Amino acid sequence: MTGSDTRLIPTGRGRPRDHRIDEAVLAATMRLLEEGGYADFTMEAVAARAGTTKPAIRRRWASRRHLVVDALVAAMGEAPTPDTGCTHCDLIAGIATLTTAFAGPGTRRVWPALVADIAADPALAETFFTRLFEPRRAATAAALRRGIDRGDIRADTDLDLLLDLLASTTYYRALFGHLPITDSLAEDIVMIVMSGVATPAWRAQHERPHRHP
């Protein structure tokens, strides 16, 4: 654990940490968020659902908000973008973990309130960026660099802007709920973005089969 990771409270010496409790608590957290949302979410309810105690949870997580961040990490993955040798396949797989997580009622109900808490709490913001946002972004950035090396993406592409474009649609829909997060959204996002940044060679090979009428 790094010095900047504030989600866990050191347990000191003693019995080895039981990771089964961690898994049960994270699973209980997501179930409770799906059932009751973020506002009514409590450590006591998690402890009862996970079959443990509030002190046991407090030894692992500094606050309920830190617990929610870790539950999102468990649901969404820290570095989900694979390396299959196919640029758009890798990007679709990575974005799909985001759309799948946000399509669920628990994550969609949590997101607006969690964003507000992150804005008001610098320590929680650091945990969120360190545990969830930055690792996922780094995995997708690596996939984009591989795409440049393969000749699928223009070498002069602004990677930071491209990363924002790929993820922002899902975050935007999860935050405002104005449009659904559909099963095809990850592929739709990637294919539209790639049509704008891809080289002519990639476009000639891949764009037409994925173009929607």
Image: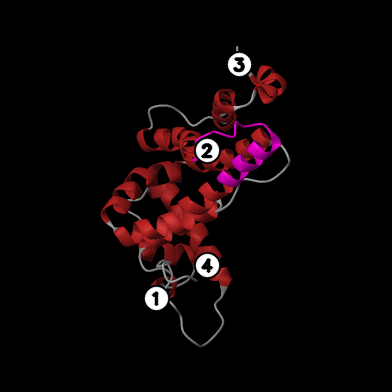
Give the residue pinned by disc 1.
55
Q: Amino acid at mark 3?
A: His
**Marks 4 and 1: CB-CB under 8 Å?**
no
x, y percent for residue 178: 38, 27
For marks 4 and 1, the one nearer the N-term is 4
User: Which element is circle 4 on?
Assistant: helix
Q: Amino acid at mark 1?
A: Pro
Q: Is residue 177 magenta?
A: no
For marks 4 and 2, the one nearer the N-term is 4
Looking at the rendering, which quadrant does residue 189 occupy?
top right
| Residue 42 is at least partly visible in this image | no
**What stretch of residues is rendered in magenta?**
141-159
Q: Is residue 157 magenta?
A: yes
Residue situated furthest left in the rendering = 120
x, y percent for residue 112: 34, 43
Give the residue pinned by disc 3.
212
Distance CA(mark 4)–CA(mark 1):
13 Å
Residue sitting nearer the eye, 213 or 20:
213
- The label nearer to you, 4 versus 2, is 2
Q: Residues within 10 Å of mark 1 (few under 14, many from 20)?
A: few
Distance CA(mark 4)–CA(mark 3):
43 Å
- The label nearer to you, 1 versus 3, is 3
Looking at the rendering, which quadrant does residue 63 occupy?
bottom left
User: Which element is circle 3 on?
Assistant: loop
Give the residue pinned by disc 2.
99
| Residue 130 is at least partly visible in this image | yes
Give the residue pinned by disc 4.
22
Distance CA(mark 4)–CA(mark 2):
25 Å
